[in-house]
Every structure is written in C-alpha cells, then in structure tokens.
Image: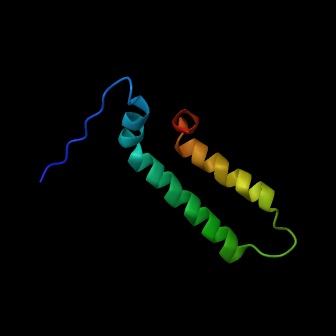
C-alpha cells in the first residue's frame, strides 16, 4: 500500500510544512509530556513554581521545534 500526499504550493505551504515536520512535533510533545509527568510525580511542596515549570516546558518545545511560531 502506498500513501501519496499532494499539496498545491504556495497555497498549501503551511499544510506541507506541518506534514514534513510531523515527527518533530510528535517528538516534542512526547518530551513535554515526560517532563510534565516528572513534575507531577516527583515535585511537591511549596518550592513548586508552576509558572517557572510551564515556561521550562515551553522553552524545551521551542528548542525541539524552533520554527514552531511559523506553524501557528
């Protein structure tokens, strides 16, 4: 079985870029999920600053997918 994706460029440039980078996005989401899981499992108490933790997750995602803003 074959699957062929076809895009009309430049009209569907965004969709084309998302299809090409899908594995990078999935990898970034898996890493972010693991990071959040570790926060929830291992960090408790008053020293937990959720704002800083969420910023750390965003930074990690943007390191893994530097052109993320282009796809939003």
Percent position (x, y) of residue 29? 52, 56
What is the quadrant of the C terminus in the image? top right
**Front residue of this view, candidates 20 and 42:** 20
What is the quadrant of the N terminus in the image? bottom left
Residue at far left of view: 1
- The residue shown at (63%, 65%) is 36
- The residue shown at (56%, 65%) is 34
- The residue shown at (58%, 58%) is 32
Q: How is the image coloured?
A: rainbow
Residue 38 falls in image quadrant: bottom right
Up the image or down, 49 lies above or below 10; here it is below
**Front residue of this view, candidates 29 and 16:** 16
Q: Please indicate whether residue 61 sits to the left or right of residue 15 in the image.
A: right
Q: Please indicate whether residue 67 sits to the left or right of residue 12 in the image.
A: right
Percent position (x, y) of residue 71? 51, 37
**Front residue of this view, candidates 3 and 29:** 3
Up the image or down, 2 lies above or below 67; here it is below
Q: How many marks can you see?
A: 0
Percent position (x, y) of residue 21? 41, 42
**Front residue of this view, candidates 6 and 56:** 6
Residue 63 falls in image quadrant: top right
- The residue shown at (53%, 58%) is 31
Q: Please indicate whether residue 43 sits to the left or right of residue 15 in the image.
A: right
Residue at far right of view: 46
């Amino acid at each position: 079985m074959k699957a062929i994706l076809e895009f009309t460029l430049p009209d569907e440039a965004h969709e084309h870029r998302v299809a090409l980078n899908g594995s990078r996005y999935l990898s970034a989401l898996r890493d972010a999920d693991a990071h959040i899981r570790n926060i929830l499992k291992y960090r408790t108490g008053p020293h937990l600053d959720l704002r800083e933790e969420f910023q750390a997750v965003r930074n990690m995602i943007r390191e893994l997918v530097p052109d993320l803003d282009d796809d939003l």
